Amino acid sequence: ILAGKADAVFSSRFRGETTRALYFWHYVGNRIVSLVANICTNLLLTDIYAGYKVLTMPLLKKILPRLSANGFTIEAQLTVRVAQARARVYETPISYSGRTYEEGKKITWRDGIRALAEIIRCSAFDRF
């Protein structure tokens, strides 16, 4: 962003070194959600749920009125809105240590279903 080559930078847990593995089904679910997001947005992201995202202020101002999701669904909606704004997106690796449910992990398969529905809804029926 500082070099003027990107409008948004997304992090990826799958491009960096992982110190503790994800749960198998969380990994599979994340890959499915990321694949559907890539198909619907023509982006090539490995991890829409990584959490660290940086946007330029002009991009944020453009998409902010179109962001309305709550919970983990915001990750899916944000990804689609950034793509719809035709932003230049880069992905950068981060180091990651997965949490257990006892340590506070909260995402479930229901969040994955909601994310898929949001990606399809925004991509097909709520374009800007």
Image (spheres, rainbow, N blue to C red):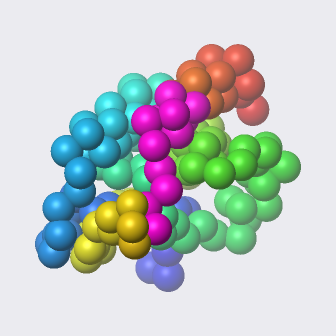
Number of marks: 0
- In the figure, 105 relative to 47: above or below? below
Residue 111 seen in the current view:
yes
Residue that appears at 40% across and 28% down = 36
Give the camera-side residue of 95 and 91: 95
- Looking at the rendering, the stretch of residues picked out in magenta corresponds to 104-115
Residue 80 occupies quadrant: top right
Residue positioned most to the front: 102
Residue that appears at 79% across and 61% down = 61
Is residue 105 highlighted in magenta?
Answer: yes
Residue that appears at 23% across and 51% down = 23
Q: Position of residue 121 (x, y in %)?
A: 65, 22
Residue 18 occupies quadrant: bottom left
In the image, taking residue 61 as reference, residue 36 lies left or right, namely left
Residue 89 seen in the current view:
no
Q: Position of residue 46 (x, y in %)?
A: 29, 48
Is residue 107 highlighted in magenta?
Answer: yes
